[in-house]
Amino acid sequence: SKDKKDVKAEKGMLQTLTGAVSTAQPGTEPQNQEFEECWIRVWQPKTSQARKTLNKNAKAVTKALKMQKKGDKKGKEENGDEGYEVLFEDEASVAGTASILGIDDTLDPVHLPSIPNSKEFKAKYKLAIKDVTVNKRAKNVVVVTTSFKKFKQTRELIFQIEDDAVSFVQTMRQQQSLEEGRSKQKLQAALGGITLMPKEQISLLIEICSAWDLPAADLFSSDPFVSIVFNGQELHKTKHETKKLDVVFTLKTDSLFLLNMSARDFFSVEEGVMFVVKDFDTFGANDVLGVVIVPPKMLYTCNGERMVFDLQNPNPKEPSKGKLAIRCRHATDNDQRFMANYAKDQKQAEGDASEKQSGGKGNVRSMISKQSKVEKKGPDEGARKYLVRPFPDPKREEETKWMTERDIESETMKESNHWFDMGSGDLGRIFVEILACDDLPNLDAGGFLGNKTDTFISLVYEDSVVRTDVIDDCLAPRWLPWSKRAFIFHMLHGSSQLFLGAFDFDGGVVDDHDLIGRVAVDLSNMRPDTEYVLCYPLYDTAQMSKRKENGTIKIRLRIELEDERNLILTQVKPPPSIYVNVKKKRDFRVVRYTCTGMYDMEKFSIETITQYVEELESYKHLAYYVEDALMTLLLWRSTASFSIPLPDFKKSEEEKSAARNVFEKYTKSQTVAFPIHSLTAFLAMVILVERPGLFPSFSFAAIAWGMIAITEYRRNSPNPWARSKGFLEMFNMLVLGSSMTTPHDIKPDENKEAAEEFQQQWTKRVKDAEEAAAKAAAEALKRQEEQLKEQEEIGEAEVDISTKGGGVSINPLIAFKPILYPIQQALGTVCNGIRFTRNVIIWEENYFSFWVTLGSFVLAFCCLFVPWAFLIKWTTRIVVWTLFGPWMKAVDVYYVSKLKPLSEEEEREKKAKESETRKEATELAAKNARIKREDATKLKVMKKYRFGKFISKVPILKMDRFPDIPLPNSSATPYKPKPVTIAELAMEEAGRNRTRIPGQQLVGDMIPTIEMPGKTDAPVGQAAKHRELLQKGALGANKGIESDTAAYAKIGSVVIVAGLVTWFGVPVLATTIKWIFQGKFLSLWS
C-alpha cells in the first residue's frame, strides 16, 4: 500500500484464473452461451509455516529460473523434488500458474507452485483483470491501481525477484489484450440473440408491484421495503410499509424508478438486477427477508407484463418464503417526463377542477356596493340599469358595465365567446351553456342591506369537473357570453347524466360552499342537431320525499354524435366505474352534493330507513298502471291512431292553397283509433291454445311487445318532456347508423294544459285509491278494537303473577345501530335494484330497454324453430322408461349391490384430490382478487397525485328516486349553424376560442396516461371535416365526404340488384343453354 501508515506488509500469491462460464438456461443449447472470464486472485498464507513454505518455494523457483536461463540441465536433476513442499490441489492447473510467475509452460509441472492448498492458504479477494491497471514497474516493484465500484486504490506489489515483476507485467498486458474479445463473447452470451444498436442507451421503467407471504422479521410482522441493487450498487429503494406481510407498493412509496445506462454496461454484469426485500429497523441493520435476481435479458425484453418471483433466502440453511411481483418496460417519453416531474415533486394536477376561484365580496363590501342605478341622461334616460357581473365584456367595457334588464336578457341568449373542452370519451360531444338562475333563496346574512347569495354552478359529467364564474349578490344571476359559462364534454357512455349544482360561494378558509339545489340532466332521450333551452327546478336532494324547490336554472344544450351505431353498441357492456378527484375538502363536498344531493344515504340514519320504507310502499302505485293496462287490453280500448285520407271536394280556396300537393287539395285526413294491442293478444292466445309448443317463443315475444307498448305509451304522453326514444328509432341507429328522425321541435309551454290535466287526473286517482285503502284499513282496525274490547269483558283464563320490570326507558337507537345499519344497507340495495328495473321497464334507461326488447325478439324468433313438444315428449319418455322400469332391479342386482365402499386409503386420496382442486381454485381466485386490489390501490394513489387527494364516485346509471324533468317553458329547436368560409371552419376545428382540459380517466399500467380524444377536430390531409357547414358556393363546399348511410345504401342497392339478376337470370341462362344443346335449336333451323 502507498499509505505510509500501513507499515504491515502482506505476503501472498497472485493467481490468474481463466475459464468458461455457461449462462445457458435449462432446455437451451449451452454451446452458444459460453464465454471466458479472467480474474486476479490474491491468496494469503493462513499460518507462519505456510509463509515460510511460500518463501522457500519462491527461492526454489528463482533458482529454477536461473538454471533455465543457463540451460543447466544437470542442476534440474540434482534438485529433483527437494526444494518443494506439496502445497498443490492438482497438477493439471500448474501450467496455468506459470504465466503469472513468468515460467515457460514446458517446464516440469511438479516443480511449479499451483493453486495453494486450502489448509495452508486462504483466498483473500479476487479482481476482474479489467479492474486492474499497471501504472509502472521499478525493478521488482509493480505499482497498480485497483477499482471496485466507485472506490479506487493504488498499491505496490513487491516481488521476490525482478523477473517475477517483469513476468507479471507481461502477463497483465497479454490478458488485457484479450479482454475486449472476452467482453464481446460475454455480451453475446448475455444478449442471447438480441441485437443491440451501436452505443445503444437503454432506459427501463421498473415498478415494484407487491410482495406477499413475507416472513415475520419482528414479533408477528415486518416493515418491508425493497432495495434494487445492480453491479453491487444500490440504484433505488422503496419506502417501508409498517407492520405488513402483504404489501402493495405504490407511487407514494416510490414503487417506480428509471434505470438509465448503456446497453453494453447493462448486459456485461454477470449477476443481473437484484431485488432485495428487507425489514426496516430503526436501530440496527435491516434484516433481509428475501432476494430475487432477474437476468438483464428478461428485463430488456419485458413489455410491462406483471412478473411474479419466489423470494430466495440468502441463508441456505433457512427455508425461503414469500413472493415479489414486478413490472418492467422500456421507458417512453411520457414516462421520463413524469418521473422527472415527480422527482422534482411538482404535484400540479392535470385537469384539476379545484382551481382558484374568486367571488363573494363579503358582507361589508356588499352593503356599500352599488348594484343598480337610474340613468339620468342619454338615450336610456330614466331607465334602471344593473351592474354587469362578474365583469363587463373586455371588448366593450364601457358599453357593458351597466345594462338594462332587457339588454342583459338579450346578451344572455347570444352565442358564447369561449368554450372549455373537457373529458375523455369519443362517442360524441355535449355542448352546455349555463344561462341563468331565478328565484334563488338568500343564503347570506344582511340581505336587506345588499348582501345576497353569491352563485356559481358546478358541472360534473363522467370524468370532468368544472365551475362557472361567481355572480355576486344576486338572486337571479345571468351568465353572459364573455364569462366562463360554456363547456364541451366528451361522452364515454350513452347513459351518463349531466349533474348541475347551484352553490352559494363562501370565501372563508373553513366555510363550505352552501348547496342551493342540484339537477341531473338526462341526455339519453335528446336528439342530435337540436338546440335545447331547458329550465329545471332546483332541489337539494332527489332521494327524500320532503324536499323544497329552491329556484330554477336555465341551460342551453346541444349534442353531437360521432357514430349513432357505435353509441348503441357500446351500451352492451356495463358502464365503467368513474371517479373524479379534487384537491380540497370543500371542493370534494361540492362534487358530492352536485352528484348525490345534500343527504348522504350511506350514513346511518333513521330518516334514511324511513325514506326507504316509504319508497317501497310507493311502488304499490304500479298496481294502478297494471290495472289500466289490463282493462285496456281486455276491453278492446283503442291504443293506436291511424290517419286515413278521405275524398273532400268542399275545401275552400284558402285550404287548397295551403295544401302541399294536388293530393292534399282534394283529400282530408281522418284519424281512426284502433285497439291494436287487444287484437294482437287475442290472435296470440288463439294460436297458443291450438299450438302449445309455441309457448316459449310467445313468452319472449310478449316481453318484447310489452316493452314496445310501454314506450308507445310514453311517446303518446301529452308532456313532450316525458317522452322517450322509440324502439324503431333505436333500431335504425343500430342497422342504418342513423335514427332517421328529424330534430326535436318543441315550443315553450307546448301541451302545458293537457299535461297538467293528465297529471292532475292521475294524482286524483292515486289519492282516491289511497283514501279508499286507508278507509278500509280504518274499518278493519275498528273491528279489531271491538273484538279486543269484547275479549277484555270476557277476561283472561290465565293470570301471570310474575314481577314486571320497571325503570326509565332510554332511546335505543344508538344501541341498535349494529342491527339497524345492515337493514338500512339492505333496503338501499333493494331500492336501487327496483329503481334500475323500473327505469329499464319504462324506458328511462332506454339503451338497456332497447337491448332487452331486441334480445326478446331474437329469442322469440329462435324458439320458433325448436320443436318443444317433441323435445319434452321424448325427454320425459326416455326418463320414465330408463329410470322407472322393472329392469332397474337388474341394475341393483348386477351393479349397485356389487359396488364396494372406498377403502380408507382411497377415501383419503379422493379427499386429497378434492382438496387440491379446491385449493387451486382458491389460489386462482385469490390471485385475481390480489391483482384487482393491487391495480385499484395503485390507480387510487396515481389519481391522488395527478388530480387531488379527495375522490368522489360519479353515478352513471339513473339511481335517483325522483327524476328531474324539464319545466313546461323549456323549448327545443332544430340547430342550424351559421354558414362559414373554409378558413373560418378550419380555424374553428383547429380549436379557436377553445381551451382543452383533459379528463381524469387513466388507462394503462405502471404510469397510466390520460385517455383523451384529439386536441382538435381538424382532419389529416383535408382542409376541413364538416364541409356541410360551409357557405353555399364557398371553396370546397361541393367536395364533401360521403356519409356512411349513403355508402351503405349504395352497397345495399348493388347487392339487391345482383341478387335479382342472379335469381332470374341464372335459370333463364341455364334453360337457354339446355335448349341449345338438346338440339331443339338446331332442329328449328333445319
Image: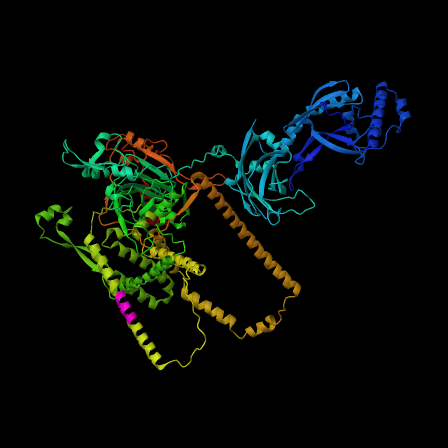
Q: Is residue 396 visible?
A: no
Say whether residue 772 is magenta: yes
Q: Which residues are magenta?
A: 769-778
Along the line of sight, the residue nearer the viewer: 13 or 991: 13
Q: Quadrant of residue 148?
A: top right
- Residue 237's spot in the image, x, y percent? 57, 37
Along the line of sight, the residue nearer the viewer: 1073 or 312: 312
887 relative position to 858: left or right: right
Please tell me whether residue 1019 is drawn above or below residue 244 in the rendered image.
above
Say whether residue 976 is magenta: no
Q: Which residue ends up furthest to the front in the rendered image?
A: 807
- Residue 928's spot in the image, x, y percent? 52, 50
The secondary structure that dominates the magenta segment is helix
Q: Residue at x 46, y 69 (%)?
A: 876
- Residue 429's spot in the image, x, y percent? 33, 41
Q: Quadrant of residue 612?
A: bottom left
Please tell me whether residue 853 is drawn above or below residue 372 in the rendered image.
below
| Count of residue discs | 0
330 relative position to 538: left or right: right
Please tell me whether residue 15 is drawn above or below residue 304 in the rendered image.
above
> Please, which colouring scheme is shown?
rainbow
Please tell me whether residue 695 is drawn above or below residue 186 in the rendered image.
below
- Residue 517's spot in the image, x, y percent? 30, 48
Q: Is residue 101 visible?
A: yes
Quadrant location, the N terminus: top right
Q: Residue at x 57, y 31 (%)?
A: 195
Along the line of sight, the residue nearer the viewer: 1073 or 643: 643
